[in-house]
């Protein structure tokens, strides 16, 4: 029925939802005398969407042998839900001549 129950004396409980959606979270507290109280709230888990990549520094044309410097810019709709996500991004520049770079800002001749 989708229920997860955990008995703990800790006021902190961690849980990772398996998929996007809106979930009802219910807390049941029972004291040593058997008295009970409950509280509920909703937890909205947003869908994980692909990041959007753009870059700056690439002119429409460049002279042969000239140094080109480009910088990546990434936005992620999930950033609000997981502030560390942007810091975990990996970059891969494929220059078209077989050269590859993995720096956020990169140069190539």
Image: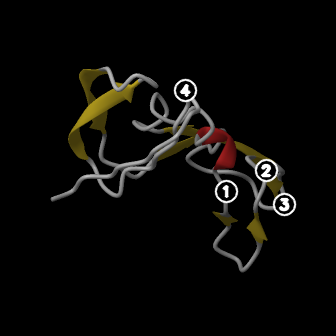
Left/right of residue 25 with respect to residue 11 in the rendered view = left
For discs 3 and 1, the disc positioned in front in the rendered view: 1
> What secondary structure is found at the residue carrying circle 3?
loop
- Residue on which the image places disc 3: 65
Using the numbered discs, state the Cα–Cα distance from disc 4 to disc 1 in whole angstroms. Answer: 40 Å
For discs 4 and 3, the disc positioned in front in the rendered view: 4
- Return the residue found at the far left: 1
The foreground one among 45 and 16 is: 16
- Residue on which the image places disc 1: 91
Q: Quadrant of residue 74?
A: top right
Q: Are marks 2 and 3 in contact (CB under 8 Å)?
A: no
Does label 2 or label 1 sit earlier along the sequence?
1
**Which labelled disc corresponds to residue 11?**
4
Left/right of residue 10 with respect to residue 79 in the rendered view = right
The foreground one among 86 and 34 is: 34
> What secondary structure is found at the residue carrying circle 1?
loop
Does label 4 or label 1 sit earlier along the sequence?
4
**Which labelled disc corresponds to residue 106?**
2
Q: Is residue 56 something one can see in this rendering?
A: no
Using the numbered discs, state the Cα–Cα distance from disc 4 to disc 3 in whole angstroms. Answer: 62 Å
What residue is rendered at 30% in x and 47% in y? 47
For discs 2 and 3, the disc positioned in front in the rendered view: 2
Q: Are marks 3 and 1 in contact (CB under 8 Å)?
A: no
The foreground one among 62 and 109 is: 109
């Amino acid at each position: 029925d989708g229920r997860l129950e955990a008995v703990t004396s800790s006021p902190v409980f961690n849980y990772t939802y398996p998929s996007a959606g809106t979930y009802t979270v219910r807390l049941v507290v029972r004291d040593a005398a058997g008295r009970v109280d409950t509280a509920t709230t909703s937890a909205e888990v947003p869908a994980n969407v692909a990041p959007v990549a753009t870059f700056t520094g690439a002119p429409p044309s460049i002279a042969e042998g000239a140094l080109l410097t480009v910088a990546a810019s990434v936005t992620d709709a999930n950033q609000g839900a997981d502030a560390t996500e942007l810091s975990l991004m990996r970059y891969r520049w494929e220059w078209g001549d077989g050269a590859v770079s993995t720096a956020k800002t990169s140069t190539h001749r």
